[in-house]
Image (cartoon, helix red, strand yellow):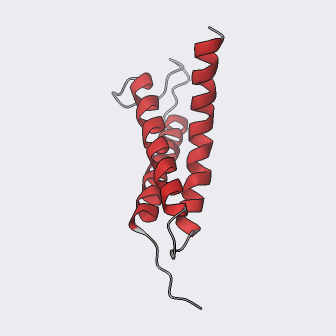
Amino acid sequence: MSNLKHTNTGIVSFVLILMVVIYVLYTAILDIAFFDEATMSTWRLNIPQGVEILILTGVSFISFVLGIVARFQKESKKVLPTIAIIISGVFVVPAITGLIKGIFYA
């Protein structure tokens, strides 16, 4: 068996998408835990929702591109880039679909 190593771009793409997943889970848990039935509101950060979505989509897109680059590097492990491509695709594909619908069907 050859001595393959993880590439730096593969590790970075995996860590970026891991940060996005942790942030999404963190905000979802806080929204559920601190839901106020009287005012029908949740605990939120002081970040506008549009900016939050743009940042998460941008980081996911960067992770997607870095994962593709790392996936095609020769003589390296492909596990982390593959996981990063799959998970970031879950975040990027709906954003691209919504963008296309907004441009052509608006």
- Give coordinates of residue 73: x percent, y percent: 50, 66
Q: Quadrant of the N terminus?
A: bottom right
**Left or right: 80, with 93 as reference point:** left
Using the image as rendered, state which of residue 102 and residue 35 is in the foreground: 102
Image quadrant for the C terminus?
top right
| Residue placed furthest toward the bottom | 1
Residue situated furthest top in the rendering: 106
Residue 67 visible? The answer is: yes
Answer left or right for 50 relative to 94.
left
**37 in relation to 73, above or below:** above
The answer to whether residue 6 is above or below residue 22 is: below
Tell me if I can see residue 43 in this picture: no
Q: How many marks?
A: 0
Residue 84 place in picture, x, y as percent: 54, 56
Residue 11, percent from left and from top:
43, 64
Residue furthest to the left in view is 46
Q: Residue at x 62, y 43 (%)?
A: 90
Q: Give whichever of 73, 23 is nearer the camera.
A: 73
Query: At x 48% / y 42%, what residue is drawn?
Result: 61
Q: Give the residue displayed 44% in from the left and 24% down from the top.
A: 49
Q: Is residue 42 above or below residue 101?
A: below
Front residue (pair 51, 101): 101
